[in-house]
Image: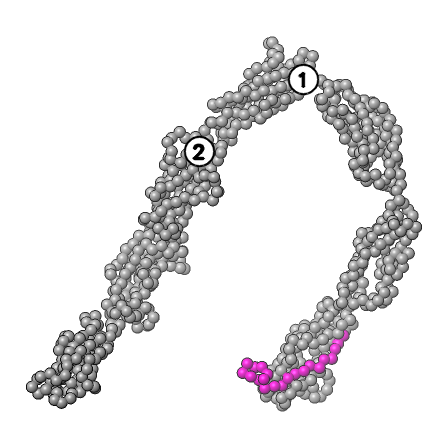
Amino acid sequence: TGPLQDMNFSIPEAGGVRFIYQFTSEPPAVSFRATGEKDGIIDIVPKTGILYLNGSLDWETKAVHRLQVESLDEMGNTVKGPYAVTIYVEDINDNPPEFDQMKYTGVVRQNSRPGKPFMYVHATDRDDPTTLHAQLVYSILHHFPNPYSEMLFQIDNVTGAISPSRMGSYYLDPQKQDTFTLVVTVKDMAGMTTNAFTSSTDVIITVKESLWNAPSTIHIQENSTQAHPVNISQVHSNEQDVIYDIFEKEKLPRLPFSIDQSGVIYVTEPLDREEKDTYNFFVVTKDNKGELVDKPLRIHVVVEDINDNPPVCQQALTVMEVQENEGGGSNIGTLLATDRDEEDTLNSRLQFKIQSQVPDVPASNLFFIQQDTGILQLTGRSLNKRTASNYSLKVLVTDAVFQTICDVQIHVIDINDQIPIFEKSDYHSVTVAEDLPVGTVILEIQATDGDEPGTGSSHIIYQMKEGDPKNTFVIETDSETNRGFVRIDKALDFETVPVYNLVINATNPEPLVSGVQYNSSSLALFKVFVTDVDEPPIFHEAIYKEEVSEDVPVNTLLMTVEAYDPEGGDVRKWLRIDSTTGQVYTASTLDREQEATYTVDVVVSELNNAAQKSKATLILQLLDVNDNPPQLAMDYTPFFCHPVSGGERALIRATDADQQHYYSAFTFSLVDDVNTRNSWEISKVNATHAYLSPKHANFEEKVYNVPVIINDNGKPALERKVNLEVNICKCSSEKSCF
């Protein structure tokens, strides 16, 4: 209740008959009157001033009611007012959402991009849009058929946009399933309450084949004379209003292709197969924001060959040799030519034909060339160098369109009927020191050959025929003078070979004619004396390695390091304790746990010449023995909460500095006294751990010393007694001591 004044009221809709407010009157007012947007629902009791509803308000019909209320005297005259009384109707969720259509239909293309909407559903709710009552969310309830573990379609829960899922983008195929039915639901209250209203509708989706397909391989003939650009193919996007573009990964200086906004692909200039025979690039579609719409399509272009290249002689002049005694049909050589057109096609097939010969021998064809191989052969007649020492041929090389002339010169060479002859048969001897460097020339030799100079018949090859089984020497030939140079090829060693008795032979790379053989004129003798040089001693081994136990006694003999003098002199035996025998002894106690490996450089020198010395490395590896008793690993202080309740246990761990192969497992035990054994017990967990447990509950809050014995069971077995501190304490809720 209250005095008459301007007032606002907020009243939920659909509440039925109810009291709103009671206005109080002041004399001389005796009654009240309400006018305005009462709509037959709102009224006032004149005598009492009670403002009330005689029915239900409806937000969807009228959200605000504006009234005027005044007080009257007995004559009906206005005493106070009129005052504005405004009633705001509060919306309640009393309307379910409704789809715009009873059923929706849509079309999606195969391979459409995931998340790209192809249709929308839409629903409305008559409740107040500013409240949760009209906030709608969409979802897919059912998916018929649903052949996979995930749905092929997805819906934006706010916009109602339906698009392929990632799986749908991959698996949608009209050949397998061309129609799907989705049951789409919409909920109000933003779907956040269980009593939200829900409506549903069917969405029928037809799957059609993708328009976005890469064309098959495009074939373009090279050097086209058409006006460019030339239409070579076309692609079609599944979406409307897209932007077509081309990109390539090869980073070519220029890409001779373009695409228009209808998806038509053009070649923009004539192509040359010999420059590039294939092209690979990609066509993409983008939206007006530059985002990809379809997956990139790979375009493959093959440039087809035409016969646009003539044969090319591999050499401006091809020179061949033939001996004058060669028989008919002998191969002289092969004329090589190439064609830049595509290999293994008729465009690059070459054929050969002799066009002319100089000098020309009347009534006789001396040479023949195989048409398809270019192999040049002698015909039935042998050549005579006295008749002609050179022949010049012009060979016609053709493909299906072009022809080229290749020049060939044939030298008739003398037959190899002369053997090399040394200028002297004995080069006597030379004396060299054994440390002469490898590569040193120790002798020059000379032989001559009466065959035609500059041919294989007259070129001389020198070799060691006898006296050099390990190839200590090598002979090089000057190709112009046929002079030979004997060089040292491997290090000399007086102690191994002090004298070399060498036999050198001279031969030709061209075989001798029948009936001619090499003889003693092609042999020469040569002797090499190697002199001794005083060399440093040499160890028998570069590295000496030994293993010993770490507990070996002091002055134990470890090994003997030996060296020898290449000249056979006395070697001073060495190392530390005994410099003359080379016997190595321990000088102090060793401990593997401190240092497991010792590496020492040892030097040996001659007794009479300290400058002559060598070095070797001694590596001493200590083997483990069981010389360390086990000990308790103090990871933490064991504790038990007071009062001890029984059944509790603490984990303890033992360690040992020795290698584990000396013990299989630790054993744990308590000292043999009555108090300890009556209060505690110990039980093994595994090779290195045990549990300690109290045996009764009568413990005070204090630290107890529990004597524990740990044995490593090694050879020999070692044990250690440890006083283990155990804390009996008050515990927090986290089971830890205060």
Q: CA distance from mark 1 to mark 2?
A: 48 Å
Name above or below for residue 58 compared with residue 326.
Answer: below
Q: Which element is circle 1 on? A: strand
Q: Position of residue 135 (x, y in %)?
A: 30, 67
Nearer-N-terminus badge (1/2): 2
| Residue 716 can be seen, yes or no | yes
The kind of residue on which mark 1 rests is Val
The residue where tag 1 is placed is: 412
Task: Residue 11: give its label.
Answer: none
Query: Tag 1: Cα neighbours inside 10 Å, few (<14), some, or many (≥20)?
Result: many
Figure quadrant of the C terminus: bottom right
Camera-side mark, 1 or 2: 2
Q: Which element is circle 2 on? A: loop
* Viewer-proximal residue among 406 and 155: 406
The residue drawn where x is 67% and y is 82% is 725
Q: Position of residue 418 (x, y in %)?
A: 77, 19
